[in-house]
Image (spheres, grey):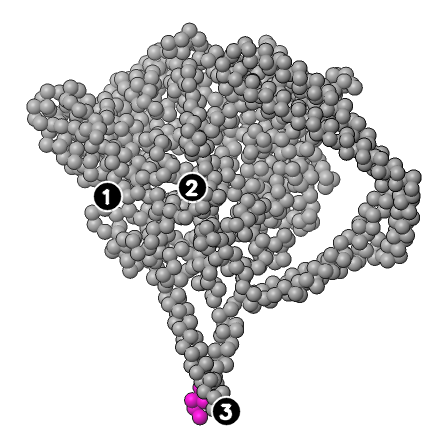
Amino acid sequence: MFFSVLLLALSVWVVWDDEFGLRPWKKYQEEYKTLKQDKLEKDYRRAVVDFQRAGGHKKLAELEAKLGKAEAVFQSKDNQDKYSKLTKQMDTAHLELTKSQKELRDFRGQFLETEYYYTKTQQPEYKTKMDVLQRNIDAVGLRVAAQQKVEDSIKGSLYALTAVKAGIQAEIETLKNGLEEKKEKIANNGKVPIEIKQIHIKDIDKADRCQSCHIGIDGKSQVSGKQPFTRHPASFVYLDHHDPGKFGCTFCHRGQGRATTSTDKAHGTVKHWDEPMLEGDMTQTSCLNCHGDIKGLRGAEKIIKSTELIKKYGCYSCHKIPGYETVGDVGPVLTQVGTKVNYSWAINWLLDPKKYFATARMPKFFFSQDQAESIADYLFSMSGTTRHDVDNTKSKPDAKLIEQGKALWAQSRCNLCHITGGRGGNNVKVYAPDLSKVGSKVNKEWLFNWIKNPNAYFPGTKMPRFRFTDEQINGLVAFITTEYQDEEAEYKYVQPVEINAASIAKGKDLIQKFGCYGCHKLQGMEDMVQVAPSLKKQGVTFLRNTEMREKIGMELSSIGSKPVDMLDFGKLKKSIPNDRLSYIKQKLRDPRGYRLGLRMPNFRLAESEINELSSVLYGFTDANVPTRFLVPSRQELDRMAGVSSYKFTGDFAKVIADVKCTNCHSIRGIGADYAPDISLAGSKLQEGWVRKFLENPDMIRPLLQQMPKLGLTSGKPQAKVTMPKFNLGQQKVEDTNRSDVDVVINFFQQELVTSDIPKVIPQIKTITLDEQIAKGKQLYDLKGCRSCHQIGTDGGALGPNLTNVGNRLTQGFIFKHLENARKFKPDIVEPNYGFTETERIYLTNFLMTLKLTAK
Amino acid sequence: MQTTLKFRKIALLSALSVLVIAAGCGKQHGKSGAKKVSSVTAAADSAAAATKVPFALKEGKRLYSQYCGVCHGETGDGSGQYYGLTPTPANFTDKAFMKTLPDEVIFKAINEGSASVGKSNMCPPWGKSFHSEEIEFIVAYIRTLAGS
């Protein structure tokens, strides 16, 4: 008896569990269906009300009768003859037009090609060919216009014939407002079967059943904002470019796509499933699977920001990471560091960089005092034989000299990159050192030579050469070394002390063990010519270049897909979750925590930085990515095509190596986004203005300079910043007879141009230029341009000041910019107003009148 | 006849019960998986959970900061970093004022410019620059500025 009851209970449970318990998606699909039904019915009821309000069936009958009459008129023999005749005419006219249009396209293509060769080679024969082609283009252009007119007139006649009928038809459509379709939708919704929904993608071996619960994920409209019914957020970015039918879900989101029996299993948050579903911002890590270059990629904002951390901390210095092979060193060259810094400073720095300044990027290696001294001894012995300090406060410079230096410091915008006393450093991505205490760190002689020519000490440094005179540099050195002192600085070696050879040897071992050369160039010395004979006699040797090439860390190219079993949790096996993400985060938090003997230093990252960095590392996978998914970067494309990537050449390369324009500006994809992208400067800017601006930079966008600060701090904007004065135009470029300003302008005009920006804008002949300018002014007032732009002192300070825009920009650029500002700068604040061409001509003509007259 | 049926039932049910037990075990395995948490990571994870913000609001905030905050202020109080506007930009932190504004009006003001809802022309039309869903994100974020 007992067993029969047990069996019965068991069997009921079995049937229930099989039917419902293990099929949670059924419930969701039912619920979704109800929700959708409600929504559709609501829609339908609203449509019915609208229909009744607009006249209902009575009106419909009237319209249908009218349509019948119109149809009869159209069907009359007379009209039918006319109609067929016109259709035939239309066919011939359209054929001719298409032919001419093709001819025009061909000529234009040839013209562009010839223009390209002409700009490359400057051969006159190309110029002649261009002229001939231009004449052809003009002639065919006229023909096209004429044929277009003919076609338009036939179209007009055709339209006149059918207009009445079409009008009534449209009226009926508006009246019905999709009533029947709506009704049909309701009926169809009832018929949708409750079943597992699966996407199978063969080439990545994925069978995703996520839509069995996330039933509305790719719906056209939102049925419910609740999970799992919601639509994919921002599907215009994500789904529109990644059709779920071709990509599936788990390729980007991870998780266990085949599981259908429980939410935990499907989301992969269960034991023995290595790929839990990515949540929140982590999801963007998947962009890295296919996109070779995520710069400017819409919808990847978080991961773009996070990737910057790899560059900031230079992870690629010790770890091999694909795509970062050509990024420069994070630390300065140390070969001559003994001529630069105080020994006492070097020791404190090696012991704890963040103690010296909070923004220090160098990690803590946990050296003992002894170890730090050995490393410093090795470094100092590369350029001398002693430990030595210089106390700059001992020699007081002339007060007037300091004053001059202070003025020059401000004028040169040193604080644009460097922080002093907690202020400045707006151009964050340069990672310039904090100079608040630099006066106690470096000696004056070195500082003078550094400012005079930074490339000489550190080839490839981001510090520009400002073309100062020696007297100016003396002023700056005097100002910096007196103003920026460290009150707690020690000077233990004002009396130099000889370096001990045994300590150097110990330092050599430490440098090799911790791989200092990953971040710092420590030019290997094959022989001992630079070292004092006394050390050589004691058997001191230095690392050779060949001994310093190996990356000492683990390769990171597939850390994001490494099986969890292969991760060494060591001591923490029992105290942290055994999954990949926890492993990565804990490693970043405490790099030597897993077991004894680990070498990785501690970067003392903020928890937010750990989250960001681990999301990037999680994206370095050896995922099986079919070629159809790949979006190679420009460099990869160039490499595949066997073309060398864009590089600055000729005299301009010399200027840029000096002035480092790309610290702030981006040119042809090279450089930073702190200042405007100047890739099209040749087409955009007028030569005269560029010349004046380079010689004496002025403020153009009073507030936009602060834009990178927005959203990051709540404080008032910092001091307004313009481009630093690089003292251009006063010297000739090395080995040439040309001034640097001429070289820059020549480069702009030769390389930074586009045929998208016309030299002249279309003309309007029906009204005079003065009338057009007046209309442009009206538009300027009507559209509220003054809320962002200033003319004189009237208006807002967000956009560029337009007082002198007629001298600054070319008319072609203004005309194109007004059409769609985002074409030239995708994240520009200025919205697209949807101006017509005529309106743009008016506005351009008005703006070109805005000129500051020379004083 | 009856015996065969009974026999089949028993066979079927015992097979099923084995299956069910197996499935149940599977579930328990799953639960025991990731429960061991150290104090360090627990703190970090709870912090992450506390800041779990819906996509729409995160995206809305990003867009607002870049495009709207300049005039309307980072906190939405209408001050902005960019002061001296007449008339002053709308104050989204004013609860009474926000109550009078339906979502559709905010949407329209962003989409077609402030002039379209009977205000000055100082706020430009953004409809051709943003996707309509992006404007919805911004509206959703603006709604949060007055607090609940």
Residues shaded magenta: A1-7
Q: Residue A599 — which label?
A: 1
Image-based side of A251 in relation to A31, left or right: left
**Which is nearer the N-term, disc 1 or disc 2?**
2
Quarter of the image with the N terminus of chain A is bottom left
Quarter of the image with the C terminus of chain A is top right
Q: Residue at x 51, y 29 (%)?
A: A705
Q: Residues within 10 Å of mark 3 (few under 14, many from 20)?
A: few
A306 or A283: which is nearer to us? A283
CA separation in Å, label 3 and label 2: 71 Å
SS of the residue at dot 2?
helix
Give the chain of mark 1. Answer: A
Residue A608 percent coordinates (x, y): 41, 46
SS of the residue at dot 3?
helix
The image quarter in which residue A181 lies: bottom right
Q: Is residue A426 magenta?
A: no
Residue A81 percent coordinates (x, y): 88, 38
Residue designated by label 3: B2
